[in-house]
Structures are given as structure tokens and as C-alpha cells.
Image: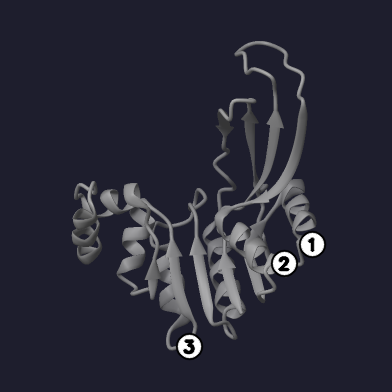
Amino acid sequence: MIVTLTPNPSVDRTIEVEVLHRGAVLRARSSRVDPGGKGVNVSRALAANGRKTRAVLPGGGWEGEQLAALLAPADVPVVVVPVAEPVRANVSVVEPDGTVTKLNELGPRLSPEEVEALTAATVAAAADAEWLACTGSLPPGAPIDFYASVVERLGTASVKVAVDSSGAPLVAALEAGPDLVKPNREELAEATGLPVATLGDVVAAAEQL
């Protein structure tokens, strides 16, 4: 069992147009709506490949209900933690040459009580898991050390923890000793303050991390 935690999930709308003109009224060629968020995508991929998974995420507003409904056909069991503000909705505008313009909302502002509820739900959901994947950006209101707090709350549980984030939340999570971190090149350079241009740079930055 692999449990995923997505503290800032989204409902993603993709709209295809001939050409994106600012200030114009455009007619879409096609559109679709997908469940979004890094951990949500991990759980979707696991379920599609026959692996047991469980997705933990906050859910608020009509968008939160839509997100849960979109995940149901994908056979992804979801633990939804109710929050007051709606889940964010992101929009991608795609042109025929592959150019993508993205408009991403910030996400719901979580209260301290909602942060605690999300943490507790994650710890409970991961009790019988092999891995917990803590993924993506944090919503407004979540403390920078949110992922670190989740790792610490797991205590002596046998579950292994992977953290896939960036910036201050990634650096703060390191203090809690996760089993795996997955920065890309830009995130590795940001976390260490080192240039990452060669394989040797990657090794040096990874060792510092």
C-alpha cells in the first residue's frame, strides 16, 4: 500500500484554442477536466497499474466534491478532510504548437485546526502502508514545517516516507529525516545554494542535502 498526501490538490481544466489572444473572445476547440495535484497523480498512476493506494487530501466547496467524483472512476480510495474554503481550480490553455499557458489558484487557506485534522488523517491512513508520499506545494495557512510535522508524528511506524516538494517546505522536511527526497535540478540548487550544471555538481549538492 502506498499512501499519498496532497495538501493542495486541484481541479484542472484544460482548454484547447487555435491561438491565444489577450483581450479577445475565443472559442475553444475542446476541453476536459481532470483531478490534479502531485500526490493525486501518483495515486492515479498506481491505481492504473494495479497497485494499492490511498489518497489523503483536503476537500472544500463544490470543487472539492468534483475532485472526489473525478477520482472515483480511477479506483482511487480517497480520505477527504473537510475544510471551509474551496479546493483550487487551475486552468491550462493549450495552443496547437504545444504552447501552454497556465493559471493556477493559490488554494484554500487552512486554519490551524484543519492543518491538524489533515495531519491526523494522514498518520491514520499510513498506519498499514509501506510508503507515504508527501507531495507538492502547501496551501495558504499550512506551516512551512508541515511535512516535517507529518514525518515526526509517524514516530516509530514502519512506513517509509518520501517527500517531493520544493523550497522551504523541502528544507524543513529534511530535519525530520524522511527516507527519500526527490528534488529536480532547480529544486536541488535552491535547497543547497550550489550550482547544479554537471553530474559532479549533482553529487555534491545531493551529499550536502
Q: Where is residue 172 in the image (x, y as percent from the top left)?
A: 33, 62
Residue where numbered disc 2 is placed = 76
**What residue would you read off at disc 1?**
72
Please report whichever mark, 1 or 3, sits nearer to the chain's N-terminal start: 1
Q: Which residue type carries mark 1?
A: Ala
Q: Which mark is residue 38?
A: none
Give yes or no for contact between labels 1 and 2 (Cβ–Cβ under 8 Å): yes
Does residue 120 sit above or below 201 in this rendering? below
Q: How crowded is mark 3: few (under 14 residues within 10 Å), some or many (20 or more)?
A: few
Tell which of 73 and 65 is nearer to you: 73
Above or below 30: residue 108: below
The local secondary structure at tag 3 comes to loop
List the residue tagged with mark 3: 158
- Where does the image place residue 129, in percent across and percent down from the top left? 57, 82
Q: Quadrant of the N terminus?
A: bottom right
Q: Quadrant of residue 116?
A: bottom right
In the picture, measured across the screen, residue 197 lies left or right of residue 63, that is: left
Residue at 67%, 76% (x, y): give it. 52
* 3D distance between C-alphas at marks 2 and 3: 23 Å
Quadrant (top left/top right/bottom left/bottom right) for the C terminus: bottom left
The residue sitting at 58% across, 45% down in the picture is 107
Q: Closer to the N terminus: mark 2 or mark 3?
A: 2
- Give the amino acid at mark 2: Val
Binning the other alpha carbons within 10 Å of mark 1 as few (below 14), some (14 to 19) or many (20 upward) gives: few
Query: Percent x, y for residue 70?
Result: 77, 54
